[in-house]
């Protein structure tokens, strides 16, 4: 997500909603290689002992695990991909993505005014991230399957009973 600062920057948000944990990284760009670096950090730093990580993410063109082959040697890319299971949110359902919800909270609590340089942006994001994690701010997700069948009815197949 592009930030609301005057300096060109990008925010990568990782969220584990039930644990009340998030990790925000500020990068210069939002390229496939930047995304690949985030996936390596997710696997090797944040969940090194997990056998499989379920990753819910949007459909942004740079958010493809195939980019790991552009960033790393084939064996390393394969190792990372084998540890990640991807679930994509619907194309017009960014509000279903909890990371997007957290980015909205970050914007309201921390990025409401213009930020003139990347160092200040990094400091603010780091402080916000630490505070939010220290308070274990969990996401109380209340959207249920029945609600999804109404709100997202175009995504569900229509079954005709004869």
Image (tube, rainbow, N blue to C red):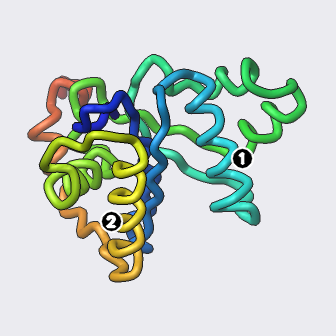
Tag 1: Cα neighbours inside 10 Å, few (<14), some, or many (≥20)?
some
Instruction: From the top left corner, tell me how far across and down residue 105 is, in percent.
Output: 20, 57
Give the residue at mark 1.
83
Which quadrant does the C terminus fall into? top left
Tell me what residue is drawn at x 33 percent, y 82 percent.
Answer: 135
Tell me what residue is drawn at x 85 percent, y 35 percent.
Answer: 76
Instruction: From the top left corner, tell me how far across and down residue 137 is, in percent.
Output: 30, 75
Residue 157 in view of the camera: yes
Q: Nearer the viewer, residue 122 or 129?
A: 122
Farthest-out residue, front: 116
125 vs 28: above or below: below
Residue 144 in view of the camera: no
Instruction: From the top left corner, tell me how far across and down residue 126 is, in percent.
Output: 42, 62
Label total for image: 2
Which quadrant does the N terminus fall into? top left
Q: In this view, does 48 lie to the left or right of 105?
A: right
Give the residue at mark 2.
128
Tag 2: Cα neighbours inside 10 Å, few (<14), some, or many (≥20)?
some
Q: Nearer the viewer, mark 1 or mark 2?
A: 2
Q: In this view, does 16 lie to the left or right of 73?
A: left
33 vs 146: above or below: above
156 vs 62: above or below: below
Picture quadrant where residue 50 is located: bottom right
Q: Which of 51 and 30 is in front in this view?
A: 30
Instruction: From the top left corner, tell me how far across and down residue 14 is, in percent.
Output: 46, 52
Q: Earlier in the sequence, mark 1 or mark 2?
A: 1
Picture quadrant where residue 129 is located: bottom left
Q: Element type at marker 1?
A: loop
Residue 37: image tag: none
């Amino acid at each position: 997500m592009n930030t609301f600062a005057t300096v060109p920057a990008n925010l990568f948000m990782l969220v584990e909603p039930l644990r009340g944990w998030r990790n925000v990284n500020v990068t210069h760009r939002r390229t496939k290689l930047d995304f690949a670096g985030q996936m390596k950090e997710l696997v090797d730093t944040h969940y090194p002992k997990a056998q499989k990580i379920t990753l819910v993410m949007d459909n942004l063109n740079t958010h493809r695990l195939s980019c790991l082959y552009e960033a790393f040697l084939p064996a390393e890319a394969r190792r990372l991909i084998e540890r990640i299971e991807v679930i994509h949110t619907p194309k017009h359902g960014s509000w279903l993505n909890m990371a997007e919800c957290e980015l909205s909270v970050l914007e309201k609590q921390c990025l409401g005014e213009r930020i003139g340089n990347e160092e200040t942006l990094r400091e603010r994001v780091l402080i916000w991230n630490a505070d939010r994690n220290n308070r274990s701010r969990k996401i109380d997700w209340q959207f249920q399957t029945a609600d999804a069948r109404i709100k997202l009815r175009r995504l569900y197949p229509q079954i005709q009973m004869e």
